[in-house]
Image: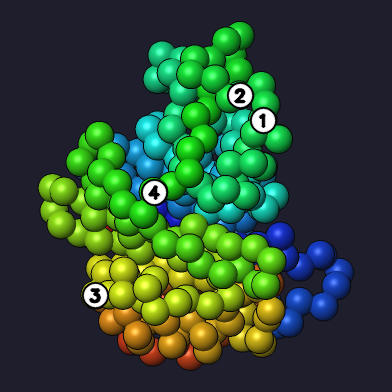
Amino acid sequence: MELILLGTGTSQGVPLLGHPNDGLDLSEPKNWRNRACAHLVSDGAHIQIDAGPEFRLACMKFGVPAVDYFFLTHGHSDHILGMDDLRRFCDLRGGNAIPVWTTPEGKERVEAIYPYGIRPQSTQGYIALLPELAPAEMTLPCGTHVRTTILPHGARFVSLGMVFTEKKSGARIAYYTDCSDVPAEAIALAKDADVLVIDALHRPPHPTHLNFEKALAVAEATRAKKTIFTHMTFRVDYVRDSATLPPGVVLGYDGMKIEI
């Protein structure tokens, strides 16, 4: 099982040049962040989680060869606006649609933004997507087992959390981004995971995202073997803030690869 973090930032992942940057060291490559998304290779299948505006560039830079299945955590622009670039992966599937699982809001957004792509077969180079509501539990054709949970994303939105279990190895990865809280059900689902990737916007409190303090509490509650922070703003400096984290908790960075 292999996880590649294609992006670990937000729309405020790096500051506007010439503006205050909260001490961010712009000479450190790990402080330059694409919008958060991830690529999972499990039981031989390629599973993509979200696709922000830099999705195509990240695929080329970090060597993503295929997408067999797609999970959209929610319909916000920094997670959905790269989905048109799935068209090349549809081509590699012989034009067959890529299955997409998401929330009701995410499905509505996919259908609104990509009405030309909602089809079982690509035509004239268009993408082919089959968006469905994510069930609570499913087994992908490759054998990987997926359990999903709904995470509050502030007062108005929700995000899809996922726990993937590889059939071949039994390895478990939980991916919880864009959430302001992690309910008890989601904590139980990620219990003792090999890897927990968790929303950690920055240190100050925020109404729609976990901050460092809350993300650390989730890491402790799940007892994940390794916890990786993602979806960070320019207020997070890789070297400075890495030094403050407890054992087993690290900051993610674009291109980070985790093998289990």
Q: Residues within 10 Å of mark 4 (few under 14, many from 20)?
A: few
Extreme residue in the right direction = 18
Residue 114 numbered tag:
1
- Mark 4 or mark 1: name the one nearer the start of the chain: 1
Q: Pick whichever of labels 1 and 3 is earlier in the sequence.
A: 1
Here the colouring is rainbow
- Whole-angstrom CA distance, mark 3 to mark 4, is 22 Å
Question: Answer yes or no: do the residues labelled 3 and 2 have beta carbons within 8 Å?
Answer: no
Mark 2: secondary structure: helix
Q: Which residue does the numbered mark 3 point to in the structure image?
A: 192
Q: Position of residue 127 (x, y in %)?
A: 57, 23
Instruction: Between residue 168 and residue 7, name the one nearer to us.
Output: 168
Per the image, the residue denoted by label 2 is 117
Circle 3 Cα neighbour tier, 10 Å, few/some/many (<14 / 14–19 / ≥20): some
Q: Residue at x 58, y 62 (%)?
A: 158
Residue 95 as seen in the image, left or right of residue 260 = right
CB-based contact (under 8 Å), mark 1 and mark 2: yes
Q: Give the distance between the C-alpha atoms of the residues marked 1 and 2, in whole angstroms.
A: 5 Å
